[in-house]
Amino acid sequence: MSKRKKLQPLDRERSRLKKAAKRRRVWSNTKIGIGTLFAAFFAILFLMPIVLTITNSFMSSSEISSNYGMVFATTSSGGKVYIAEKVNLKFIPDMVSFSQYITVLFKSPEYLLKFWNSVILVGPIVIFQLTVATLASYGFARYRGRIREIIFFLYIILMLMPYQVTLVPNYLVSDWLNILDTRWAIWLPGIFSPFAVFLLTKFMRRIPVSVIEAAQIDGAGEWQIFSRVCFPLCKGAIASAAILVFIDYWNMVEQPLILLSDSEMHPLSVFLSKINSGEIGLAFAVATIYMIPGLLVFLYGEEYLVDGITYQGGIKG
């Protein structure tokens, strides 16, 4: 009997602990479920404009005009029309039509010309900005000093300034260098942009000094330390910077409008910012084509982007 009396409190305590553990698991699963629902809701909310653009690009011109024509309608004097009715947002077209893509890809080569203008403007900026940034960030990371810290501080100040603040100085300098209305007016400010320098410098400064000292003991020079030690460790950060720089300049509008007076040299992003009432359907198709490079770059480099942002420098085990 004494053994049974001793076991009863132990059984009750075990039962209580099991119930408490079960309640904690239920509450934890409930929180995970609620968080998943919130994440799914906001994911769907943010993806709706992209899905709407892609699906509406397969609508006919008449269907698009009947759904959204009132949004872009203007009066005879050029003013906007008051919208008394609700806009009909449709995600599924009544009949799939490829007429918009046929017009964009075959009947109107100007859109493809503007697309390649975007590639020509953005490609050199990404390549040479990363080249300049890797070399400059190595110098900032390896050698400390008052003058270098002041220069790096000025880089940070320039990065914090919005482009609209530096647009007038860029215009005046481009005019002084006689590169206004040429692609160099876009390339040069982009190549020497401080963003990638700041990002890579902060990353390189996290590389352990012991790694560099070991390379020096083995007889490595500065170029060998940069090319064989720092550069391989910074591949994730370089890929992250490349993705962010590409997306930033792929969507630029102000720079071409101010620095390039010739509309033939404007990128496709400028066209998307000037939607006329008769080109709504074409705008959907052009926007879909214009999204493809950015989506491919992000999807392909998502792992590098996350790795470059979260990795703290050093050697992975």
Image (cartoon, rainbow, N blue to C red):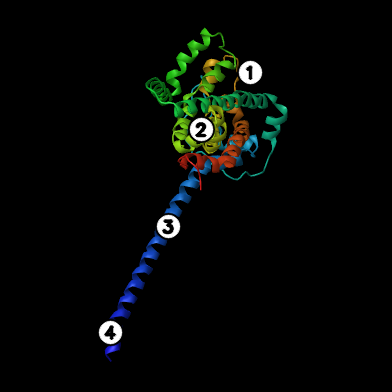
Which residue, given by chain and number where applicable, does mark 3 sit on?
32
- CA gap, disc 2 to disc 1? 53 Å
Which residue, given by chain and number where applicable, does mark 2 sit on?
216
Instruction: Name the N-terminal-most of marks 3 and 4.
Output: 4
Element marked by disc 3: helix
* Residue 208 seen in the figure: no
Which residue, given by chain and number where applicable, does mark 4 sit on?
6
Seen in the picture, residue 18 relative to 156 is either above or below; the reply is below
- CA gap, disc 3 to disc 2? 50 Å
Callout 2 crowding tier (Cα within 10 Å): few <14, some 14–19, many ≥20 = some
Residues at discs 4 and 1 in contact (Cβ within 8 Å): no
Q: What residue type is labelled 4?
A: Lys
Residue at left 54%, top 9%?
Answer: 177
- Give the x, y percent position of residue 259: 54, 15
Which residue, given by chain and number where applicable, does mark 1 sit on?
264
Callout 3 crowding tier (Cα within 10 Å): few <14, some 14–19, many ≥20 = few
Nearer-the-camera pick, 62 or 28: 28
- CA gap, disc 4 to disc 2? 70 Å
Q: Which of labels 4 and 2 is toward the front?
A: 2
Instruction: Name the N-terminal-most of marks 2 and 1.
Output: 2
